[in-house]
Amino acid sequence: MRYLTDLSPLSSRDSSFPSRVTPGKKKPLYTPLSPHTAYGNAMIGIFRKTMTTLATAATTAPASAVVPRVSIPTNGVDYRNKIVLAPMVRSGELPSRLLALKYGADLVWGPETIDRAMIGAERRVNPRNGTIEFTRMPSNGGRPNKSLKESVIYRIDPAREKGRLVYQIGTASPELAVQAARVVAADVSGIDVNSGCPKPFSTSGGMGAALLRTPDLLVSILEALVKEVGTPFQIGISVKIRILSKPEETEALVSRLVKTGITGLTVHCRTTPMRPRERAIRDQLPMVARICHDAGVACVMNGDVTSRDQGLALMAEYGVDGAMIATSAETNASCFRTNEDGGVAPWRDVVYEYMRFCMESENRLGNTKYLLNMLIPGKDKEFKDAKLSKTYLDICRALKFEDLLPAAMRVDELLGLDEKWEAAPDTESQAEPKSKAVQNAKVSEAARAAGGGAVRTKTPSPAVHAGGPIRRSSAPQPTKVVQVDAEQPAVEAAITAAQTQAPSQVTA
């Protein structure tokens, strides 16, 4: 504005300035400007143009400074603006993933699954609940008298997990990683490489956090997955890491990883030696987020995130794109709800829903009890009763989930747990003979074990398990029941009928 006031006198002193009119004469329509007046007006024009340019630049600077985002593949999912369930061995099976989704999780990571466990697995659809199961014949451990039985390595609910499931792989080989990922790629929305697990079963094979010490290998794994799996299947490839002890080392590693073609990077804000009881370190988080954003890669934080509300606050504070919840989801999955939506639910409500999902998906009882021990407060009487239970029926009785008893019976029969019932069912509905679905399933298993010709047998996979633990997965809740024949009821039919009698419960 100073220049404008300085230029006014210059123009007004000029005798030819249009505002000066001779008295008694009409104001001329046009008066030629003197050189001084022309110069002043030109300067005003330049000034105004400069200020307009600066204002426009100031307005558009933040947007133009952002590097275009890495494009999300057609069948992939964007990790931005998401509160997600962390990958957890045993705690990340299908029932707990469905529980997290029910209470508001935007995405769910499955448990780390070792590459060799999935290579050669057979994909099948469970006719009773519509879930996708990846199975294989395990070794009998040198016990010739023990009959072989298929092991379910991984389960997926193709309806309720569609567009929201990320498969995490444990690997130390680009070739094996590609082979394993191809088995499941068509049924998931992303493949995530675990390079953050500090536990010996992972690091001893060069996997997990051990990959942080071999960045060349980690980069080659990600590049192979992007090229051989991500592009053909049109899904995203991502990686989960831990911070390193020195910020400059973390910076160097992340700078290499974001150039591999990945769509997302999750950083656990603890170093490899740190354990969950130690407080997360977030000093390096802004730096990691900046590197990811410069490359257009989504950055998700992990470590001491306890709820959706806290996760959203941390995202705003540290400039990251998403937040991942782990241990808090193990103890109460309703942590994914905002306080506005009801906040943390009573443990009995959460356990009721969890038991429904477990029975619908025919989850292994041992895995079901593992998470129940965390969901039920230790001081409650139900904790001890559930812990000592040997069947689904006993658990539902101990928790007084009377409306779930018919479904518990059928699952116990299907899984061969009915012989362990502490007390025989005493109601008329529970005393009915085993359903045809259960009988058919058992006949099928018996025929398979005996090599019956009427049942399609499965040839053992040419891929040999290298001795590491085979991860098993839990079963999903069906949205569509697929029956073997018109007379065969599905397990969840009893659950659906029971839900209509339940006094008050959250719907799936």
Image (cartoon, rainbow, N blue to C red):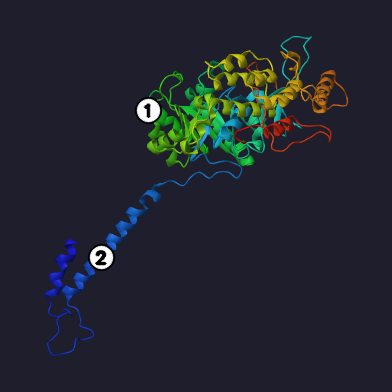
- Give the residue furthest to the bottom: 24
On screen, 82 above or below 362?
A: below
**The label number, if any, that marks residue 122 in the structure image:** none
Q: Which residue is mark 1?
A: 247
Q: Is residue 125 visible?
A: no
Question: How many callouts does the rendering have?
Answer: 2
Horizontal side of 53 relative to 381 (left or right) equals: left
Q: Residue at x 83, y 20 (%)?
A: 446
Pick whichever, 258 or 143, lies toward us: 143
Pick whichever, 395 or 322, lies toward us: 395
Horizontal side of 56 relative to 253 (left or right) equals: left
Q: Which label's residue is closer to the chain start, 1 or 2?
A: 2
The residue carrying pointer 1 sits among few (fewer than 14), some (14 to 19) or many (20 or more) residues within 10 Å by Cα, namely some
**The label number, if any, that marks residue 46 in the structure image:** 2
Horizontal side of 206 relative to 476 (left or right) equals: left
**Amino acid type, label 1:** Pro
The residue carrying pointer 2 sits among few (fewer than 14), some (14 to 19) or many (20 or more) residues within 10 Å by Cα, namely few
Can you tell which quarter of the image residue 388 is in?
top right
Pick whichever, 384 or 3, lies toward us: 384
Can you tell which quarter of the image residue 410 is in?
top right
Horizontal side of 99 relative to 411 (left or right) equals: left
Which of the image's four quarters has the N terminus? bottom left
Could you say whether the residue bearing mark 1 is in a helix, strand or loop? helix
**Amino acid type, label 2:** Ile
Pick whichever, 287 or 363, lies toward us: 363
The x, y position of residue 434, in whole percent, is 81, 23
The x, y position of residue 355, in whole percent, is 64, 26
